Image (spheres, grey):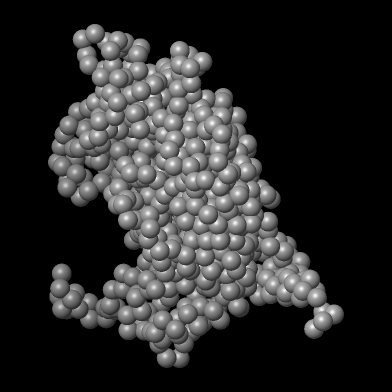
């Protein structure tokens, strides 16, 4: 073993993993472009063949509008620009609204299910199709077994899957700590747009600001960031009020505004 | 009269049991045989066949020649027929039955004159109406012409006026033709009736293999398949599937059938199964990769087929932006592989969640043209912190819509952004009506 160094062993392992995957290389993780967020995620970005969960906060969780906008930005930046399957039980997704966050309507395929079982079936079938870039499922609740199935299916095909939770009643306090097989769990909440002195007198709403929290991350660190909503290219940026403050290295940001 | 009395009058009477179903089936067969003269044929129970020969009479050398040939050929089949050609179906029916001569051809503007001499029973009326008309002295159709129409309707009901109009050609009477028999099908009869789901599935797989071989030989693919199962007790049930793109892969089609085979009730057993491709399209051969995986670009239509089979027709759609500024009409749901291009919409802020029906909210706005200060939606009070607007969207006047909406983007104290509108202009006497139409991301 002396002249068989570790680099060769690592390369051999990678080759075997490539053959097991059927010859397709693993797609690189999708970075956010914001160093503060990419630092906390394993691989420097959102993993492609995995399950990611997105929640809302309180009463806004039922509409899950902020979560939908957040996902639109992520989907817009997925390369190559393949179609996206969006499954839901209510048909209230508006394509022009997603267009403003960067997701072109030509890429959307909407599937409407009547029951939760049909919805999960549609998401699983979408995961088996390699021609899709991602699948979004607007589920009410994602039990552990279902999340495990989706995670395995996503790993097998390399299609990213996002579970956008739309509960009928507001999520309780302990809900966000429920076990799940998802790789990351996010919570996107609405935040009153910070009023800056120079624009206080200007009429109209300012740029939309979200509080994006990474609640769980397998192989990474949780964190919270104030971000401006995705622009027309799908990129998020840190909100300016925070960016101006000096940041202690590695410290979790607790307060905002 | 009872059969015994009839036999007493004529001992040599030939008696046969009535078979209405058999008669109807025979009539349908003769009607499809008459398809040689026109593709638009329909049986008219109990003993008539209607053919729409507009545009096809010249192929036989004229309408009179067509009628003569039809009667002669039917005579060779052993069927005595009376035929008539007229501008309207009602007039043709009347002249064929009551016209007297063996064949009658009516010129395009001669319907009124031709019908005038016929008895009123030629108008396909109820027997009570015919009796009432004869009692009143209106024995011929020509007697009805000078009577004022409202009086006829008042006295005899709408039916008489409808039939008269249909006979004279004033009202359209479309025929529904027989569907042509499928040319691509596979059939299997069983010596013993089958009833278990596994057997039905296995039989469907065999039929699919046979049919797909046939389709491959003709370089076509099926878009719609109908599986007819005939039960032992005479009933039949039909299972239909459709695909987004022409397909002839047996495994893929069997998976689509799997969703529906569970809904079949085999009853006492199924003795006959027929699988027909009711809609087929040309489909060239596809190039497989060396390791026998399907060609690229096939996975997405196959996925759409599977989802449609499970979620129902119309459940899988893609949003298509159309040229309309009215929010409800700005997006149309189209078939997923529809190649239509999206229209260009102006860059206005639009919500991510769009309620299909705008929900009324109670809102308080200080002055006209100002956004509301607070509003109550779904029993929750929201105080408005900042607002933007109004965006005035007027209904499409070319469609006759007179509605006008002033849309506002409001942000409440929690930071959520909503799309509210006030319906109509502000009026001092009427309270303003506010609605919530969407939620922004």
Q: Is residue B144 visible?
A: no
Q: Nearer the viewer, residue B38 or B271?
A: B271
The quarter of the picture where residue B234 lies is: bottom left
Vertical side of B103 occupied by B325: above or below: above
**Residue occupying the point 47% across, 56% down:** A216
Determine the residue located farthest toward the front in the rendered image: A248
Q: Nearer the viewer, residue B368 or B200?
A: B368
Left or right: A157 as drawn, with respect to B146: right
Vertical side of A159 occupied by A227: above or below: above
Determine the residue located farthest toward the right in the rendered image: A3
Vertical side of B350 occupied by B17: above or below: below
**Residue occupying the point 19% across, 44% down:** B129
**Residue occupying the point 76% across, 66% down:** B287
Q: Is residue A188 visible?
A: yes
Q: Position of residue B351 (x, y in %)?
A: 45, 33
The quarter of the picture where residue B158 lies is: top left
Q: Nearer the viewer, residue B237 or B197?
A: B197
Q: Nearer the viewer, residue B70 or A73?
A: A73
**Residue occupying the point 35% across, 18% down:** B371
Q: Quadrant of the N terminus of chain B?
A: bottom left
The quarter of the picture where residue B147 lies is: top left
Determine the residue located farthest toward the bottom in the rendered image: B191
Q: Position of residue A249 (x, y in %)?
A: 58, 44
Vertical side of B11 occupied by A170: above or below: above
Left or right: B433 as drawn, with respect to A65: left
Q: Position of residue B440 (x, y in %)?
A: 44, 34
Q: Position of residue A186 (x, y in %)?
A: 47, 50
């Amino acid at each position: 073993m002396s002249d068989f160094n570790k680099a060769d062993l690592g390369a051999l392992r990678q080759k075997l993993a490539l053959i097991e995957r059927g010859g397709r290389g693993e797609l690189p993780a999708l970075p956010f472009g914001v160093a503060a967020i990419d630092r906390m995620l394993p691989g420097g970005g959102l993993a492609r063949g995995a399950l990611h969960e997105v929640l809302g906060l309180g009463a806004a969780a039922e509409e899950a509008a902020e979560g939908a906008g957040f996902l639109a930005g992520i989907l817009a930046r997925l390369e190559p620009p393949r179609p996206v399957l969006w499954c839901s039980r209510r048909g209230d997704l508006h394509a022009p609204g997603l267009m403003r966050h960067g997701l072109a309507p030509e890429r959307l395929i909407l599937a409407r299910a009547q029951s939760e079982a049909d919805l999960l079936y549609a998401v699983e079938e979408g995961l088996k199709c390699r021609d899709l870039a991602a699948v979004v499922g607007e589920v009410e609740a994602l039990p552990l077994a279902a999340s495990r199935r989706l995670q395995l299916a996503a790993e097998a095909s390399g299609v990213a899957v996002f579970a956008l939770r739309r509960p009928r009643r507001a999520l309780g306090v302990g809900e966000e700590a429920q076990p799940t097989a998802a790789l990351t769990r996010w919570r996107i909440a609405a935040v009153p747009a910070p009023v800056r002195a120079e624009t206080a007198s200007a009429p109209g709403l300012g740029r939309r600001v979200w509080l994006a929290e990474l609640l769980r991350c397998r192989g990474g660190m949780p964190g919270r960031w104030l971000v401006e909503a995705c622009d027309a290219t799908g990129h998020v940026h840190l909100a300016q009020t925070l960016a101006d403050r000096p940041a202690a290295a590695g410290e979790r940001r607790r307060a905002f505004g | 009269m009872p059969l015994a009395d009839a036999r007493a009058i004529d001992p040599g009477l030939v008696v046969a049991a009535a078979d209405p179903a058999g008669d109807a089936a025979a009539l349908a067969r003769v009607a499809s045989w008459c398809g040689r003269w026109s593709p638009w044929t329909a049986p008219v129970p109990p003993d008539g066949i209607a053919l729409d020969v507009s545009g096809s009479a010249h192929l036989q050398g004229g309408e009179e020649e067509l009628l003569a040939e039809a009667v002669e050929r039917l005579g060779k089949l052993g069927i005595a027929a009376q035929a008539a050609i007229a501008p309207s179906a009602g007039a043709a029916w009347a002249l064929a039955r009551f016209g007297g001569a063996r064949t009658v051809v009516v010129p395009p503007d001669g319907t009124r004159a031709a019908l005038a001499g016929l008895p009123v029973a030629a108008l396909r009326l109820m027997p009570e109406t015919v009796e009432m008309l004869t009692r009143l002295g209106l024995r011929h159709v020509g007697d009805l012409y000078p009577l004022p129409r409202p009086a006829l309707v008042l006295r005899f009901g709408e039916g008489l006026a409808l039939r008269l109009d249909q006979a004279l050609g004033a009202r359209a009477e479309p025929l529904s033709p027989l569907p042509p028999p499928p040319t691509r099908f596979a059939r299997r009869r069983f010596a013993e009736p089958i009833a278990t789901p596994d057997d039905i599935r296995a039989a469907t797989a065999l039929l699919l293999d046979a049919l797909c071989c046939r389709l491959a030989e003709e370089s076509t693919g099926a878009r719609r398949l109908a599986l007819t199962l005939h039960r032992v007790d005479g009933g039949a049930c039909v299972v239909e599937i459709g695909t987004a793109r022409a397909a002839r892969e047996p495994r893929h089609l069997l998976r689509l059938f799997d969703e529906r085979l569970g809904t079949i009730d085999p009853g006492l057993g199924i003795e006959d199964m027929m699988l027909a491709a009711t809609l087929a399209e040309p489909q060239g051969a596809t190039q497989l990769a060396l390791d026998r995986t399907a060609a690229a670009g096939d996975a997405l239509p196959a996925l759409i087929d599977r989802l449609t089979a499970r979620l129902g027709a119309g459940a899988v759609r893609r949003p298509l932006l159309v040229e309309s500024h009215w929010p409800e009409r700005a997006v149309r749901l189209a078939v997923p592989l529809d190649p239509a291009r999206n229209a260009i919409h102006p860059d206005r802020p639009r919500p991510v969640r769009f309620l299909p029906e705008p929900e009324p909210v109670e809102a308080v706005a200080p002055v006209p043209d100002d956004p509301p200060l607070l509003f109550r939606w779904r029993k929750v009070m929201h105080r408005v912190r900042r607002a933007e607007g109004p965006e005035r969207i007027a209904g499409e006047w070319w469609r006759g819509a007179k509605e006008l909406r002033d849309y506002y983007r409001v942000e409440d104290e929690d930071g959520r952004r909503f799309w509210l509108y006030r319906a109509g202009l502000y009026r001092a006497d009427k309270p303003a009506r506010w609605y919530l139409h969407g939620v922004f991301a």
